[in-house]
Image (cartoon, rainbow, N blue to C red):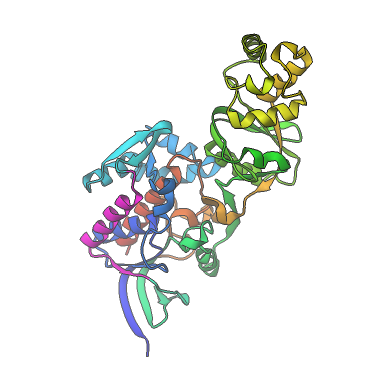
Amino acid sequence: MKNNLKTNVVIIGGGPAGMMAAIFAAKNGAKTLILEKNEKLGKKLLLTGKGRCNITSSCKEVKDLVSAFGDNGKFLYSCFNQFDNHALINFFSESGLKTKTERGNRIFPTSDKASEVLEILIKQLNKYGVKVITKTEIKDISFKNKNFQIALNNSIVTSNKLIICTGGVSYPETGSCGDGYKWGKKFGHKIEKIGPALVPIVIKEHWIKKLQGLSLKNVKISVYKDNKKIDERTGEAIFTHNGISGPIILDMSKKISQNLEKNLELRIDFKPALDYQTLDKRIMRDFNEFKNKALKNSLQKLMPKKLIPLMIELTEIDENKKCAEIRKEERKKLLNLLKNFKLKISGVEDIIKSIVTSGGINLNEINPKTMESKIIPGLFFAGEILNIDAVTGGFNLQGAWSTGYVAGINAACKK
């Protein structure tokens, strides 16, 4: 005989969206339960921002939050108007979290510890009496007589409202394995194509491994499809063992993954602040300064040390050739590599390595003001399971906080 447990609101998934939904559902008077498959809450939250937790962006207006989510951002207008980044900062500040703003409007806890963010959320859950069951496997979910029944290993939970916050399929070791899509389908929801977002890209050139670990700052990187530019960003990047990653690459990766059937090329401008003519004069000055030195010992002012051997190899100039002996056409080869360094894209890393999952629950089937399903009354979705994803900079977490907040208060208030 299975034990039966009755409650007002059940939340599946104890990540950022789930915890925020639970806090505000309970704060608004609902008897609330979180079901989490991991041994503890917030497992993925602890990994965000490389363990530092970029909780949100300091951008000033809702429209800036919306634009970070691309075409689907307009769905979030109502959510952000109800609970935006400033409301989030106030929530954490009132709970005792001190924050700081870094480059790119990124907001982090002053301690640089994601664990501090999680501790505050857990304190809030305890404050409002949220019950949490961890290490639990959901066997089935059904909807009968206006109630949800969630079958666990040894019990059945019955609730009036259900909020699904199970995330996507990125970082499966944190528990994100796509269960929420299965349940969404069961309740009649359409799942938009799942794919990676914010993921490193893979390069065809075998010599790319020579640059592994090389960090680039203030570079301009463009993506070309069949020789037509489809995206361009300026900022930071880093070479990996088989490709390239970093903020601007991650932000372009979704578009890249959606166009892999085409001939895709990456073009790096290592010196975007200088046009060709100005950079050429700069190279000539350096060559004149080091005219009696070998080329391999004369490029430190122009590029990172790790890049020098490869650039010389690609120009096919003798590395021991003195700068004074380098011909104009050889100098132009170096100039072109610095301004238009071409790499062929072979793909993106597996979705399990992506920071965020693109695709998910069709937004046309969700009420944007409440996060409630238009198909099943009392069913809500929040966070990454929805077909929303944004660029880097704290926006994806803000989407989770905001949709979780809205789902929580509406699940508690709706009769």
Q: Main secondary structure of the magenta part?
A: helix
Q: Let me know if residue 210 appears in the view.
A: yes
Residue at 48%, 54% (x, y): give it: 384
Looking at the picture, how far across and down is residue 79, in whole percent?
39, 47
Query: Which residue occupies the extreme bottom position in the image?
Result: 1
Q: Is residue 279 above or below residue 384?
A: above
Looking at the picture, how far across and down is residue 207, in whole percent?
71, 40
Q: Is residue 16 left or right of residue 333?
A: left
Residue toward you, 48 or 74: 48
Q: Is residue 136 above or below residue 71?
A: below
Residue at 59%, 22% (x, y): give it: 300
Residue toward you, 147 or 72: 72
Residue at 31%, 44% (x, y): give it: 88
Where does the magenta region start and end?
112-134
Looking at the picture, how far across and down is residue 201, in whole percent?
63, 44
Residue at 43%, 32% (x, y): give it: 104
